[in-house]
Amino acid sequence: MTQDPNPAATAIRPAILWLRRDLRLTDHPALAAALASGRPVIPVFLHDETVEALGAAAKWRLGLSLADFAARLAPLGSRLILRRGAALPSLMALVAETGAAEVHWSRGYDPDAIARDTAVKAALKAAGLGAESHPGALLAEPWDLKTGQGGFYRVYSPFWKALSARGVNPPVPAPAHLAAPDVWPASDRLEDWRMGAAMNRGAAVVLPWQRVGEPWALRRLRAFLDGPVAAYAENRDRIDMPATSGLSENLAWGEISPRTIWHAAFPRVQEGNRGAVKFLSELAWRDFAWHLMFHTPHLASRNWRDGWDAFPWRGDNPDAEAWRRGRTGEPLVDAAMREMFVTGRMHNRARMIAASYLTKHLLTDWRVGLDWFAECLTDWDPAANALGWQWVAGSGPDAAPYFRIFNPATQAERHDPEAAYRHMWLAEGNARPAAPALAWFDAVPRRWGLSPQDAPARPSLSLAEGRARALDAYATARAPDAAAE
């Protein structure tokens, strides 16, 4: 049954733009479709069940992005409407209040978003309303790339080859103006949502490291392409150098689209820039993660590979708690964990080393680590992080062999040869600790009882012992499979 428009609403029934992780103006297909309808556009963000489930750092960072995006709408003659509550009743209430005729949104690809959006679309259409989802978060939709047999890709190399051959659609320009409704619906106040409440005193420490919003993302991209991209292939694993783009936080909240990045970098590829080729392949790895999550939704919750449920990983344990607190006694691992707590991010090479140490040297279930990253990362990306954890653990798609165990000491020699990264993040035992190392003590919970004057932590086992234990566990877990072969 079609909704009757509210008599107080505009004579031309508006379109609702339901925003999620797409807080930008450039290359926003859902926004473009709402504008193309010729209707006034009401941008809406819903603090629904998916937002409620976010970790402390991610929810806080999303709040910063919402504030920035709202400010960017004002010069276009628009505003951001905020509502708290489950998606469907919230949208139906807005339709009743505004007389909206249609709702547009950018697609989500994780199981929770798919379930929510499927139910919303069915209910809106049943009410006689337009309801359309649009691409926006990926270089290619997960169903657009298929193997020769018509299935999905399980290995990255052929996925990258197929994506490169297919090409990437050009980005959609940003609008210069958004037609407003005659009457705006009521909106919550963002500050009343208290999205940073769980950050406690850590918010003030992490804030200076954030680069929030679309303008910052575009500046970052230009700076990277004008400089570090040339040596990206050689230097991207150097954790002691500013060799990466830093765009992960902006991608996570849709402050920039991957298509915008692709087409900005592609001229460098055409010029033969090896760094640009490698950079785009890393951007495509993010697509690969979402491709896999769409086709195998258990990626973030269960071992992806068959046979891994028998592996004797430990659940949460005291060693894992020391890992969370940056007190394992392995300097590079501890530095990485502290970088994350102070900045909300962690260098990708450092992520692999920290994850390997937890899952292999400490034999701790990868989901323990994934949950902590979800709590602490301001660039939290459900698919990329799930794929990363399972890849390192050995249980995931396209994974390195389990017996590839990162050695933090040799990794430090290779990727932090002058110990600059470790000095930046570790204070204990250092006569002149760096400011970021001291900031970590201002960010952590007081109940941890940590001080820069503490003695350096001591490892619970040697690297050699940890490696041997991991290999023994692998051999034992694989024994039934080997016997059956």
Image (cartoon, helix red, strand yellow):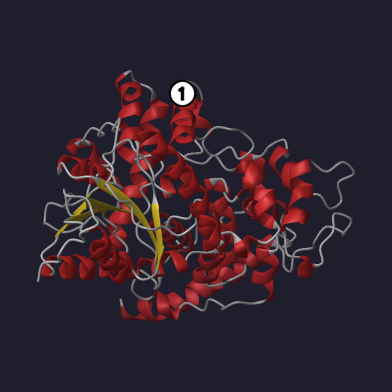
The three-letter amino acid code for the residue at tag 1 is Ala
- Say above or below: 264 vs 455: above
Q: Which residue is mark 1?
A: 230
Q: Is residue 50 above or below residue 69?
A: below
The spot of residue 33 in percent (x, y) is 19, 44
Q: What residue do we see at 55% from left, 52% from top?
A: 351
Camera-side residue of 84 and 348? 84
Q: Secondary structure at mark 1?
A: helix
Question: Could you say which quadrant of the image residue 442 lies in?
Answer: bottom right
- Residue 61 x, y percent position in the rendering: 53, 52
Task: Give coordinates of residue 439: x percent, y percent.
Answer: 75, 49
Residue pictured at 65% horizontal, 42% vertical: 208
Q: Residue furthest toward the top? A: 271
Tell me residue 192's x, y (percent).
Answer: 54, 61
Q: Who's the residue at 52% across and 72% down the image?
A: 365
303 sits left or right of 177 in the view: right
Is residue 238 visible in the rendered image? The answer is yes
Please give the name of the residue rendered at 25% of the width and 58% of the height, measured from the top-left corner: 98
Residue 337 falls in which quadrant of the image?
bottom right
- Quarter of the figure that contains the N terminus: bottom left
The reply to whether residue 162 is in sight is: no
Front-most of residues 6 and 94: 6
- Residues packed near mark 1 inside 10 Å, few (<14), some (14 to 19) or many (20 plus): some
How many marks overall? 1
